Amino acid sequence: MLKSTAHWVRPCTRVYLLMMGLTLVTFLFGILGARGLGISLLVLAFALFKGHLVGDYFMGLRGVRGPWRWVILLWLLIPGSLISTAFYLSGS
Amino acid sequence: MELHSAARRYPPGDLAIWIFILAELGVFAVFFTVYAFTRMQHVELFNTYQQTLDQRAALINTLALITSSYFVVRAVAAIRENDRRSCVGWLSAALGMGGLFLVVKFLEYAHHFAAGVQLSTNAFYTFYFSLTFFHFMHVVLGMAILAAVALKAHRGGYSAAEYTGIETGASYWHMVDLVWLILFPLVYVMR
């Protein structure tokens, strides 16, 4: 019996579409003038998540074991935490 | 690069490019952090002048870079299947998206310069021009690398058995995309 592949979508394509969607949401926050600490941290979280997807699925780190598996995630978390701290301290 | 089923010890491509990528990411991390802490001392100034930036241009550029990164992933997948023609096609499309990014960014700069805005106008613009131009130069370098890889692929220099060069160029290009993914919300949206 032949298996249908009509609905099969590459994982990288799903990741790509998800990143495009998150980017559009980020843009909407910006264009609608949404501001404040909560919005800033949410938008930053979207960006960090997209960066994680790039590292895992586009750069291929998902298939790597050992310390190299985590370098991009670590890079995202360090400046991400510092940026969050700065925005928190400034109140937005 | 998603097709590897068995775990490997090192990331795809030449290890040297990864050392270079980490060094570049380190510089951008410092840049982002300094931006955020400088903004902390000039919140109103940063929020005011951030609104003079063209968010639509930034959106187009973000979508262009994500799309080009996706095209590069497809190029790597194609060469793994020994489909050299598709590989060159995907790389060329990625270069096209990179070109779109450069054109949009150039127009954005032209608009600001025409309005009399310079690097020294205020602290916000100092960061805006420095950060985005530093990234702009990385896009130019990334496109040069992709073009060299595409040319070699076109000449039959890569196959399903040997495609390290494509993975190396792809890794650098994804880094360029990765940096912009943080830069876009930080400089254009968060306030």
Image (cartoon, helix red, strand yellow):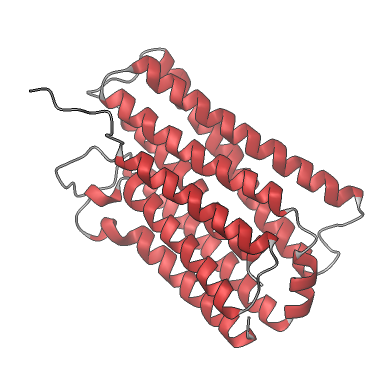
**Quadrant in which residue A34 is drawn:** bottom right
- Which image quarter is the N terminus of chain A in? top left
> B76 above or below B131?
above
Asked whether the viewer can see residue B145, the reply is yes
Question: For the point 27% across and 19% down, which residue is it?
Answer: B82
A84 vs B8, nearest the viewer: A84
Determine the residue located farthest toward the left in the rendered image. Answer: A1
**Quadrant in which residue A59 is drawn:** top left
Q: Is residue A61 left or right of residue A22?
A: left
Q: Is residue A78 left or right of residue A11?
A: right
**Where in the figure is residue B14, as x and y percent of width and height?**
33, 40
Q: Is residue A69 left or right of residue B20?
A: left
Question: For the point 67% across and 38% down, which residue is it?
Answer: B102
- Which image quarter is the C terminus of chain A in? bottom right
**Where in the figure is residue A13, as x and y percent of width and height?**
37, 39
> B106 above or below B32?
above
Q: How many numbered discs?
A: 0
Question: For the point 92% across and 55% down, which residue is it?
Answer: B116
**Where in the figure is residue A80, as x and y percent of width and height?**
48, 70
**Where in the figure is residue A70, as x and y percent of width and height?**
30, 61
> B154 above or below B67?
above
> B30 above or below B84?
below
Asked whether the viewer can see residue B1, the reply is no
